[in-house]
Image (cartoon, helix red, strand yellow):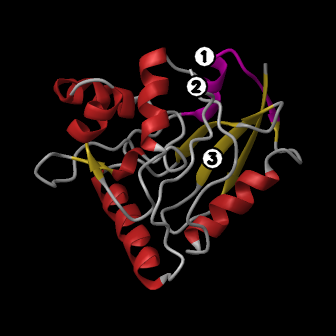
Amino acid sequence: MIASLDQTDSPAGPIAFAVNEAGALVRLSFLDGIQQYSIGEELARDGYSIKPASELTAPVREQLDAYTRGELLEFTIPVAPQGTEWQQRVWRELMNIPFGQTRSYGEIAGVVCTTRASRAVGRANATNPIPLVIPCHRVIGANGTLTGFGGGLHLKRALLAHEQEVATRSSDAPAGTQRSLLPAS
């Protein structure tokens, strides 16, 4: 497997990302996050050989840039995260959370299986290899508190504030759901 690695800037700092040979996003990392790590090491662990940015990375960069400018409410780039069947189910459900809205871990668990699995949803969120596009930042505690995010709570708060501001000022804010670009299980 080969992944093309690229980077773009955002108000939150640099974002590194990688796409596979088909142009599907396989990794995304906020480089200024609390859990800084080498995206290259993560890709290698997942069995990818890494090559520099290519024409395949341009659509992802364009959509990430449009998102940070407040011009994109729904990502349409294909994603191909590696994970267990359970993680894939949770990640597909995360992609149904509308832009500018949030859901609790228990609400996600209730849709995926049972509300008693909220901790398992949290673990799936923690292993999400494509944060932002698979919007784990939109998942909050049952009491409305912000909990856990690989980029830190300050970044989660900033992403949610950005989306709320854009959704509020946009007459085109989606009333439905973001379509899942993950393969069906």
Q: CA distance from mark 3 to mark 1?
A: 17 Å
Mark 1 is on which residue type? Arg
Q: Which residue is mark 3?
A: 16
Q: Is residue 176 above or below residue 26?
A: below
Q: Which residue is mark 1?
A: 45
Q: CA distance from mark 1 to mark 2?
A: 5 Å
Report the residue at 27% width, 42% height from top. 148
Q: CA distance from mark 2 to mark 3?
A: 12 Å
Bin the neighbour count of mark 1 within 10 Å (Cα to Cα): few under 14, some 14-19, many 20 and up: few
Label 3's element? strand
Report the residue at 50% width, 83% height from top. 171
Label 2's element? helix
- Residue 92 x, y percent position in the rendering: 49, 35
- Residue 23 x, y percent position in the rendering: 79, 39
**Cβ atoms at labels 3 and 1 below 8 Å apart:** no
Q: Quadrant of residue 25 in the image?
A: top right
Q: Which residue is mark 2?
A: 42
Label 1's element? helix
Q: Locate the N terminus and report the quarter of the image it occupies.
A: top right
Q: Is residue 149 left or right of residue 15?
A: left
